[in-house]
Amino acid sequence: MIKKGIILAGGIGSRMSPLTKAVNKHLLPIYDKPVFFYPLSVLMLSGIKDILIVVNKGEQHQFKKILPNGKNLGIKITYLEQKNPNGLPDAFLIGEKFIGNENIALILGDNFFYAQSLTKKLRECVKLNKGAAVILHPVKNPSSYGIATVNKKNKIIKIVEKPKKTFSNLAVTGLYFFDNRVVNYSKKLKPSKRNELEIVDLINKYKSNNKLTAHFLGRGGAWLDTGSIKDFYNTSAFVSAIENRQGLKIACLEEIALNNKWINKKNIEMAIKFYGKCNYSQYLSTLTKKSFK
C-alpha cells in the first residue's frame, strides 16, 4: 500500500520562458488555480495524505504562501529544495528520509489528469505492495515522450525515450508508483548523455525484474503536460470549459478533503476567508451549503 507521495515542482521551466524567469511555472495559473494544485489533487484523490513537494532552491516561501503545511486540508505537506535539476529520480534521493521504509508515488508538478473513473483507477494503483506501476495514455506525437510497447496481455515489453520510429503510441505519463526499492535503484543509476538521472532507466530496472505493471487512463480521459506555452493554455481552456459547463471544479483541494472526511465545515469557512472574494471562494460557499444541510 502506498501512503506517501512526492510532487516534483522544481526545474527552470525553460519551455515557458520568459514567464518562468520570474515565477516558478508550478505557481502559474491553470484557469483559476496554481498548476501544482492539479497534481496535488491527484495524490489526494488516491487517498495519500503525507506529501513531499520538491521545489527549487530558495522558492519554498512562495509555495508556503498558498499552502503552508497542509493542516487546512487535513493532510501533511513537507517541502524540500532541489539544488539543481538532476532528473526525475533525483526526487527519491532528496526525499530518502521522507520515504523511509514506505512505498511511494511520484507525480510531476506540471502534469494534468482528468477522467471519469480517475479516483477508482488511483485507488487501484496505490494498493501496490511490490514492484512498480505506471499509467499509459495514447498520444499523437510519440517522438516527444517515453513510449511503452505492450503485448496482447497489456504487459510492457519495451520502453523507449522519445523514439524516432515506433509502432506504439502509448506514452508513460508523469505519475508513477514504486515500492521501497526505488531509493536504492535510484542511487545506482548513472547520468545519461544529458547528465541527468532518467526515469525510463529506473522503470526499466523494474521491468527487467518482471516487476512492472501497466495501468491505463482509459478512453475519454485526458493527460496533459502543461510545461509548454501551447499545452499550458490548452489545459487552462479545457478546465474552463469543463467547469463552466458542469458547474463543478477540477482540483478543488478543499472539496476532495471534505469528501474524504479529512476536514469539516469550519475548515471550509476558514478557506473562504483565506482566499478572499473570488470565484473559488464562491464555489466553496455553495459546496458548504450542499454538504451541510
Image: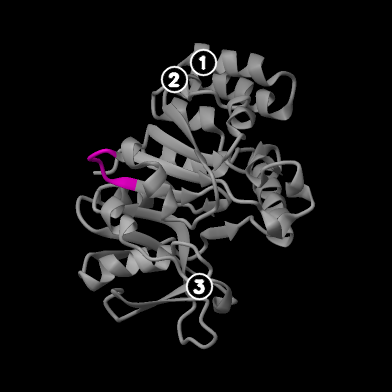
Which region is colored magenta? Answer: 100-104
Identify whether 118 is placed above or below 266.
below
Tag 1: Cα neighbours inside 10 Å, few (<14), some, or many (≥20)?
A: some
Which quadrant holds residue 66?
Answer: top right
The residue singled out by tag 1 in the image is 267
Q: Amino acid at mark 2?
A: Ile
Number of numbered markers: 3
Q: Is residue 164 left or right of residue 22?
A: left
Residue 152 visible, this angle: yes
The one nearer the camera, 100 or 290, is 100
Residue 65: percent from the left, percent from the top?
A: 63, 24
**Label 3's element?**
loop
Residue 290: percent from the left, percent from the top?
A: 54, 23
**What residue appears at the point 65 percent right and 14 percent down from the top-left corner?**
273
The residue singled out by tag 2 in the image is 263
Which quadrant holds residue 187?
Answer: bottom left
- Give whichever of discs 2 and 3 has the lower sequence position: 3
- Give whichever of discs 1 and 3 has the lower sequence position: 3
